Amino acid sequence: MALMVLIALLALGTGLLLWLPKYRLQRALARPFPRHYAEILRKNMPAYSKMPADLQLQLKRLIQQFLHQKKFVGCDGLNITDEIRVTIAGKACLLLLNRPTPAYPNLSFILVYPSAFIVPRSEIETGGLVTHGDQTLLGESWDDDRVILAWDHVRRSNAESDPGQDVVLHEFAHQLDSASGSTNGAPHLTSRARYARWSSVFLQEFALLQEAAQHRSASVIDHYGATSPAEFFAVATEAFFEKSQQLGQEHPALFAALREFYCVDPREWQ
C-alpha cells in the first residue's frame, strides 16, 4: 500500500514538473537539433555555414528556445512549415548571439502572411482632421507581443540579388528597440556611458542619412531609415549583418557601435 502511494506521489510530482515553464524549456533544449533544421539554415541563412562552431551551437540553442516559446500563426491560408519556423527563428536569433539576454520575452506570436499584407491606418492631419486608409506592408513589429511578416519577402531576403534587405532582421531590431520601454532607436544598454556614446554616434549618422535621402545620394544604409530614429536603427541593423564590409568601411563609428551592442562581427562570416 505504501509503495503504491509513493508511486502515485512520484507520478503526480512528474506531472506537475511538466507544467513548469522552466522545466519544459530545459526538456526542449535537451533534445537533439533536428538535422533537417540545420539543412534549412544552410539553405536560407548563408552566413550560418561560415560561422565558427561555437556560434553555430549557440544559434541552434537559441532557435530551440525560440521555437519552444513562440507560436507561429499562418494567415490568409498559409500553412506554417518547418522551413518557415526555422528560417524566421534563425534570423531573429542572429541578433541575440553572445548577448546575455532573453529570447524576446515580450513576444508571443509570429503571424506570417504568404505575401505583402494590408493594414488599416488612421492619421491626424493639421486641424485635427482624421483620415483613414490602408497600407501595404512586408512586416511589422507590435509592442503587444506580435511580429507580422510576409513569407515571400522573408525568402527573398535570402537571395544574393537583394543584399542588405532583410525583413526579419528589420522587425526584430524593432523588438529589441522596444525592450527599452520606448521604440526610439535606442535599445536597452547597460550604462549611462554607453547611452551617451550611442546617442552621439547615432544622432550624427541619422543626420547624415537624412541628408543623403534628401539629395537622393547613394548610401549603404536604406534611405527609409531617415524617416525616424527607430527606423534608422532597424535599417542600420540590416546593413550591419547584410553589408558588414561596406558599412564598416563607410561608417566605421556606426559599425563599431553596432558591433559593441550585438557582440559579433559579421565581417568574419562573409
Image: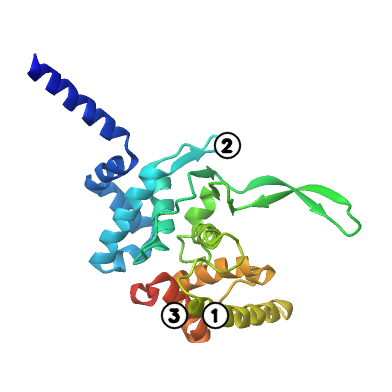
Residue position marked by numbered label 3 in the rendering: 245
Looking at the rendered image, the quarter that the N terminus falls into is: top left
Distance, label 1 to label 3, CA atoms, is: 26 Å
Q: Nearer the viewer, residue 6 or 269?
A: 6
Q: Nearer the viewer, residue 129 or 23?
A: 23
**Element at label 2:** loop
**Element at label 1:** helix
Kindly identify the residue that appears in the image at 48 percent across and 44 percent down: 108
Relative to residue 140, is residue 158 drawn left or right? left
Say what amino acid the circle numbered 3 marks: Gln
Residue position marked by numbered label 2 in the rendering: 76
- Mark 1 and mark 3 lie on one chain; the one further toward the N terminus is 1
Q: Nearer the viewer, residue 5 or 77?
A: 5
Dot 2, how many residues are within 10 Å of its Cα: few (below 14), some (14-19), or many (20+)? few
Say what amino acid the circle numbered 1 marks: Ala
Where is residue 176? Give x, y as percent.
50, 61
Distance, label 3 to label 2, CA atoms, is: 38 Å
Where is residue 233? Give x, y as percent.
56, 69
Kindly identify the residue that appears in the image at 57 percent across and 74 percent down: 221
Image: 97 above or below 197: above
Residue position marked by numbered label 1 in the rendering: 196
Distance, label 2 to label 1, CA atoms, is: 45 Å
Where is residue 56? Give x, y as percent.
28, 62
| Closer to viewer: mark 2 or mark 1 | 1
Say what amino acid the circle numbered 2 marks: Asp
In the rendered image, which quarter is residue 98 located in?
bottom left
Q: Residue furthest right?
A: 127
Kindly identify the residue that appears in the image at 61 percent across and 49 percent down: 116
Q: Residue furthest front?
A: 2
Looking at the rendered image, the quarter that the C terminus falls into is: bottom left
